[in-house]
Structures are given as C-alpha cells and as structure tokens.
Amino acid sequence: MHFTRPSHLHSNLLSPLKKLACLAIALLFLPGPLSVANGVYRSEDARGRITYSDIPTPAAKPLQLNVQPARNWSRVVKVIDGDTIIIEGNKRVRLLGINTPEVESRHRPNEPGGIIAKNWLHHKLQGRNVYLEHDQQKQDRYKRLLAHVYLPNGEHINRSLLEHGLAVVTLLPPNLRHAEALIQAQQRAERQQLGIWSMPHYAPRDLTKITEKPFGWQRYRAKVTALKRSRQYSRLIINDKIDLRIANSDLALFPPLKTYLNKPVEVRGWINRRNDHFSIRIHHPSALLIR
C-alpha cells in the first residue's frame, strides 16, 4: 500500500510543521492496516511527488515512527492493595508486570510489605484521574482489566512501585510491554536494598530443603541437575521431588535451557505442590537468574 502526496504540495514549500501534518494525514488515510513491523518508507520522484509506502524501493528512505499505545482516561475510586484498584464503573484493574505482597483478607494472610505497598498506592491514586494503557490481553481470567497506570504528569505507577522496592517484576506472556524498563527499575531497588529487598522474609531460601508449600511469592536458591521435555512443558530438574516448569510456547523468550544446566540459580515465584512433588512455573527469564 502507498500514499502519494498531491504534486502541487512541493516539499520545499512546506514548513516542517506542515510536513509533519501532511505525513500524519497520509498515514491516517492509508488503505488497510498500517504494517509498522515492516516499516514505512518515503520516496520522492523527479517531479517532486512524495510517496509513503510499506514497500521499500531502492530510492526510498525509512521513516522512524514513534507509535504510542492508546491510553484511556478514568478515575480511581478505591485501592484494594498494592497492585489492584477499582475505577469508576466498578471495574477492577490489575497492574501489569508486577506483584505486591498480599494484604490480609478472609482468603489469605498478610505478607510483609503488603500494607506499605497498599498505603503508598492509596496516597498516589485515591480519587485521582489516571491513564490506563492495556497490553495484548485486556482482561485476565478473573475478568479484571490489565493495565499500566499513568498519572497525568507521566509517572508510570507500575514502574514506580518497583523503584521503591514495593513490588516485584512478574511478567506473564504475551503481556510484555515495558518489560525492560520494569526489570531495570527492580534491579535499581534491589541494588539499594529498598523495601522488599531488605526484608528477611524474602531472603533466598534453599529450594531443596522445602518440605511444606510456603504461602506467596518467594526467592529460592537451587542448582539445575537435568533437563526434560514433554509435549507441553520443558522442565529444569532440581531433584526427584522438585522441578521448574517452562511452557514450550514461552521457550523463545529464554536462552537455550542447557545454559542453566549445572548452574546455581535464583528462582523467583510461587511453589505448587502435588502430592510430594514441588514445582515452580517460570514464565519469563527475569524469574530465573544464574548466580
């Protein structure tokens, strides 16, 4: 597909602002969806006619497009905990890419840092207007909206929680927007021993000494001794009673699994138990660090 600017609009007669407006209009009226992945190219012929297309030609030059995801404006009416809010319309929103410690309810006990994270988020958001930015999946299985939350001044709340050590990175494909920024924010907090990273409750534990299923997110030390693969999962074996599971559909996100073999690792996440076997599901490499 391509768009050709009318010949009477010569490039040297347009101010930079008008050129930008012309390009924006051109892209808006391109027939069919814009293939950003393939790029947009600008070419000019001998008569001064300028063409924009997603098909490159020898004389065409690629354009750098800053495509911003859509953001929706809403008002926060209640903060449930450090990573969950309710917006107008009684819609529950779960903040993407992070997890904060639980606060006490009839279903779960309080975890260290949970009240601190909730109070921080309440101070930031209660009664305020915010922008919600969705990723590949707009809702989770509990019908909660999934979003990155921004204040009008541009502050990315998900990232701020990580920078203060109030949350941990929890990336679940395919929702990986801003993954690198979130990981870097957590690394800064971890280096400075802020919040969660200074609490004894979240200090790494020896995974091989686990005898009961602990509650909540934890850090574990282990050594991968073998690799096995089934139709749905690849498993990093710790011993005959413990493994780490990675869905084969997520393997493209990881280095070759043999990279972890016979290496000491730190595993971050939640333990599942079935009979006398323990397993941790790993969704993203940020939860499996070679030490």
Image (cartoon, rainbow, N blue to C red):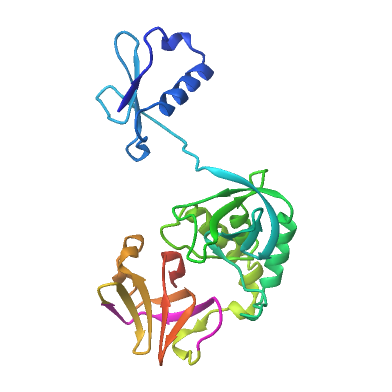
Indicate the quadrant where residue 123 lies.
bottom right
Tally of numbered tags: 0
Q: Which part of the image, by quadrant, shows the C terminus?
A: bottom left
Residue at screen point 46% across, 20% down = 22
Q: Is residue 60 visible?
A: yes
Tell me if residue 117 comes above or below residue 180 in the rendering: below
Residue farthest to the front, as pictured? 89
Left or right of 282 on screen, residue 18: right
Foreground of the two, 78 or 124: 78
Residue at screen point 53% across, 79% down = 204
Tell me if residue 195 comes above or below residue 3 in the rendering: below
Q: Residue 48 placed where, x, y %?
A: 35, 10
Q: Residue 98 placed where, x, y %?
A: 55, 63
Tell me if residue 56 comes above or below residue 138 in the rendering: above
Q: Is residue 255 visible?
A: no
Residue at screen point 27% across, 22% down = 59
Left or right of 230 on screen, residue 219: right
Tell me if residue 20 comes above or below residue 204 in the rendering: above
Q: Residue 241 placed where, x, y %?
A: 37, 89
Foreground of the two, 14 or 274: 274
Q: Which part of the image, by quadrant, shows the N terminus?
A: top left
Q: Residue 135 placed where, x, y %?
A: 48, 52
Indicate the quadrant where residue 228 lies.
bottom left
Residue 216 highlighted magenta (yes or no): yes
Residue 15 highlighted magenta (yes or no): no
Foreground of the two, 230 or 252: 230
Q: Which residues are magenta?
A: 213-228
Residue at screen point 72% across, 55% down = 124
